[in-house]
Amino acid sequence: MWLLNTADLTLHLFDAKEVPPYAILSHVWRGEEQSFQDVMAIHARAAQGDVSMLRNLSGKIRSFCSFAEKAGYKWVWIDNCCIDKGSSAELSEALNSMYSWYANADMCYAFLDDVRGDEDPRAPTSAFRRSQWFTRGWTLQELLAPHSVIFLSPEWQSVGSNHALADILAEITGIDEDIVTHKMSLNDVSVARRMSWASARETRRIEDRAYSLMGIFSVNMPTVYGEGGRAFTRLQEEILKQLPDQSIFAWGAGACLPSDERRSPYPVAHHTE
């Protein structure tokens, strides 16, 4: 697992048994977010003496590291720059590990760049209720996996937590408050019910309809971008191996998520090892 050091913004690789406490970021991608290769290239230039290159790290990366360091964290994980997507094997491993990485984080910070820090998120017309964060396929597991999620405004101010806003989150997402606050296990919820939570969420690649749900059903399987709807069929097969719940067939490969071509936060890796 790659983690960013909040002090010097360098990437470090940790074995599974040696991962230190870390904070994790959940966010909606805007344009081309800086990748693992981008960050490594910037540090390579900095190591040659051009320390000013560190200013080329994105504002989001620098701001989150600064915010997390002030909160007491030495290490953070950010999806766009902590996965080497140049390796299809590492990308597949990361997508299969994503749920557990969010679950094991000390704290998840959900950065909502389309809300206002000075508004009441409970207000019927609040920007919080309309945030794009609630429409993305991948952010579903980022809400469900961590025990604690703190929502942040564009100014990195707390808007509230999953515990304090559980009733509002239930209204927005249709997910039971006891699930949002971890008083109830996902295993106690039917397959069809869990699938319904994803029904209005968007992914760019059709395969991500399945891949973004793997952790929610405790399923592991190879990720093969280009397989199209076959990914969802494989997901169903893997779920049925563990859960004899026929309600899953209410959700065909074309029914889970409505959009095939919306942008995904986990783009396909075009290069292999």
Image: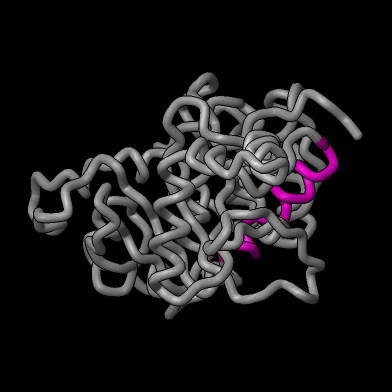
Question: Number of callouts in the render?
Answer: 0
Instruction: Report the front residue among 118 and 47.
Output: 47
Residue at coordinates 33% horizontally, 51% vertically from top-left? 173
Residue at coordinates 58% horizontally, 41% vertically from top-left? 80
Q: Is residue 11 visible?
A: yes
Q: Residue 238 placed where, x, y %?
A: 77, 50
Residue at coordinates 53% horizontally, 62% vertically from top-left? 6
Is residue 95 a member of the stretch shown in magenta? yes
| Left or right: where 57 falls relative to 84 | left
Q: Residue 27 placed where, x, y %?
A: 43, 46
Quarter of the figure with residue 265: top right
Q: Is residue 199 visible?
A: no
Instruction: Report the front residue among 244 and 166.
Output: 166
Task: State which quarter of the image contains the N terminus.
Answer: bottom right
| Left or right: where 180 falls relative to 236 | left
Which residue is the extreme one toward the bottom? 183
Above/below status of 8 relative to 36: below
Which residue is the extreme one toward the right? 273
Q: How is the image coloured?
A: one colour
Q: Main secondary structure of the magenta part?
A: helix
Which residue is the extreme one toward the top? 261
Q: Residue 46 placed where, x, y %?
A: 64, 42
Residue at coordinates 46% horizontally, 32% vertically from top-left? 202
Above/below status of 96 relative to 55: below
Above/below status of 151 relative to 201: below
Residue range (magenta) = 87-102
Q: Residue 207 placed where, x, y %?
A: 66, 31
